[in-house]
């Protein structure tokens, strides 16, 4: 019996060493990574097609200085390079006209959303990706490697066109900083070999979302409540929807949207509050359907609860996700919209096999060519705190600060070959769940 126990101990030690070695050779897949969380905007298109992939007009990012404004310059404001600023350089004061739209936003949310935080960082990861800015303030911490407007495109004038004002955190009152060159960096390598690793991080984010177990499925009848003729107030408590309370699902409620090939998620004339008393994050996955349309609507986190604290900390309380091309390139369309702690993630063109629902797992090949139908996020009259990922992002009349995913309580490792071999000694099976 002693010899048998000794053999078991030796086997356990060997497997433990294999597990340790395997774990040391790969990065944990998690809900947030060191690079993705830095950016308000991530444009994934532009490897082979030279077009504008981040369009910003009559807008400020990295700031949400006036909430539900009348769209006028601040009182006593002055113009610098064609942009409106108050005397103490508080930023763009025009464009957004969201007042009198029927928004019912709590004072706590307004407090969490308003101000300047220099979080307007943007990454354009395609080799030929271009930004085009007009009458816009980009408030970004351009004193670190992951800040400002970063482009893989090697031409600085293509990376960020127009004389957009950038603020340097170290000296925000230096008017000489109002120059595109102080905030735009071209020729950035977003591969892991460069030390940035944004492409790898995005691939991990995508695979993590796809591998999460479903808590509940909504069909067209479930989302019909969000289409109203007047600004109704709807509160959805996600705490009661969390059927998976351990492991990778512990901090999330995963809601699959099964809307049919012709269906879409329509949020119209409604104030929607996503509530969690325990700080859960909602993830909406479009498993069968076309796109998201938000019109004259708000999506906020509830006040007085832990997920409002997320908003105050610049974290996401909900993510809306799509990764399959279903005949329309406008994956997210926003008109007269306020978002608080909400992420809009379109990974369709990040997956070469994403077309027609065929998901691609090879992180070394990340672009899909839809020719003239590259997917995009478009918005007009929108503001708040969020994060936007798509082939192309077009912001007109907008104010945005960045909210990114907070650190998870559980990291989910991506198994290496050695680790899988070790697990195989015990006959364990790795689950690979697709949407």
Image (cartoon, rainbow, N blue to C red):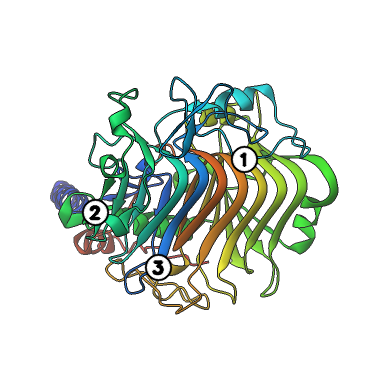
* Residue 192 x/y as whole percent: 21, 55
Circle 1 residue: 96
Q: Secondary structure at mark 3?
A: loop
The residue wearing badge 3 is: 51
Report the Cα–Cα distance between label 1 and label 3: 26 Å
Taking depth in this image into account, of 67 and 328 the one nearest to the observer is 67
Where residue 404 sits in the image (x, y, percent)?
44, 40
As displayed, is residue 44 above or below residue 117?
Answer: below
Q: Position of residue 200 (x, y in %)?
A: 29, 57
| Mark 2 residue element | loop
Along the polypeptide, which appears first: circle 2 or circle 3? 3
Outermost right residue? 229
At x 59%, y 53%, the residue is 379
- Percent of width and height locating residue 120: 41, 40
Q: As drawn, is 53 to the left or to the right of 95? A: left
Q: Is residue 318 visible?
A: no
* Mark 1 vs 3, N-terminal side: 3
Dot 2 and dot 3 residues touching (CB under 8 Å): no
Vertical side of 189 occupied by 234: above or below? above
Mark 3 surroundings within 10 Å by alpha-carbon count, few (fewer than 14), some (14 through 19), many (20 or more): some
Secondary structure of the residue carrying numbered label 1 = loop
Quarter-of-image position of residue 321: bottom right
Q: Classify mark 2: residues with Cα within 10 Å, few (<14), some (14-19) or many (20+).
A: some
Q: CA distance from mark 2 to mark 1?
A: 30 Å
Q: Is residue 101 visible?
A: yes
Q: Which residue is mark 2?
A: 186
């Amino acid at each position: 019996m002693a010899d048998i126990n000794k053999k078991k101990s030796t086997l356990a030690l060997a497997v433990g060493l294999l597990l340790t070695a395997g774990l040391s050779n790969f990065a944990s897949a998690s809900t947030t990574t060191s690079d993705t969380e830095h950016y308000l905007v991530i444009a994934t298109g532009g490897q082979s097609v030279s077009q504008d992939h981040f369009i910003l007009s009559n807008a400020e990012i990295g700031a949400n200085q006036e909430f539900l404004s009348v769209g006028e310059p601040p009182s006593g404001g002055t113009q610098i390079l064609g942009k409106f600023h108050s005397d103490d350089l508080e930023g763009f004061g025009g464009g957004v006209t969201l007042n009198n739209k029927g928004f019912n936003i709590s004072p706590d949310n307004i407090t969490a959303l308003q101000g300047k935080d220099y979080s307007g960082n943007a990454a354009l990861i395609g080799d030929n990706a271009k930004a085009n800015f007009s009458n816009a303030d980009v408030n970004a911490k351009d004193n670190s490697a992951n800040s400002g407007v970063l482009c893989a495109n090697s031409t600085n004038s293509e990376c960020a066109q127009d004389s957009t004002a950038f603020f340097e955190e170290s000296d925000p009152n230096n008017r000489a900083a109002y120059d595109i060159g102080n905030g735009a960096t071209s020729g950035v390598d977003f591969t892991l070999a460069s030390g940035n690793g944004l492409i790898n991080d995005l691939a991990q984010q995508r695979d993590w979302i796809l591998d999460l177990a479903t808590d509940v499925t909504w069909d067209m009848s479930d989302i019909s409540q969000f289409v109203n003729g007047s600004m109704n107030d709807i509160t959805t408590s996600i705490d009661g929807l969390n059927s998976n309370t351990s492991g990778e699902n512990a901090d999330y409620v995963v809601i699959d949207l099964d809307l049919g090939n012709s269906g879409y998620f329509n949020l119209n004339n409604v104030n929607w509050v996503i509530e969690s008393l325990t700080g859960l994050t909602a993830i909406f996955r479009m498993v069968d359907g076309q796109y998201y349309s938000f019109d004259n609507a708000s999506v906020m986190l509830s006040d007085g609860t832990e997920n409002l604290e997320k908003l105050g900390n610049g974290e996401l309380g909900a993510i809306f996700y799509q990764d399959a091309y279903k005949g329309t390139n406008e994956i997210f369309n926003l008109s007269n919209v306020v978002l608080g702690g909400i992420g809009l993630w379109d990974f369709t063109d990040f997956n070469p096999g994403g077309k027609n629902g065929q998901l691609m797992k090879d992180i070394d090949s990340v672009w899909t060519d839809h020719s003239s139908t590259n997917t995009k996020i478009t918005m007009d009259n929108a503001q708040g705190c969020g994060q936007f990922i798509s082939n192309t992002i077009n912001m007109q009349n907008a104010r945005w600060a960045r909210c990114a995913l907070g650190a998870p309580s559980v990291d989910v490792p991506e198994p290496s070959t050695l680790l899988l071999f070790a697990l195989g000694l015990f006959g364990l099976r790795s689950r690979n769940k697709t949407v």
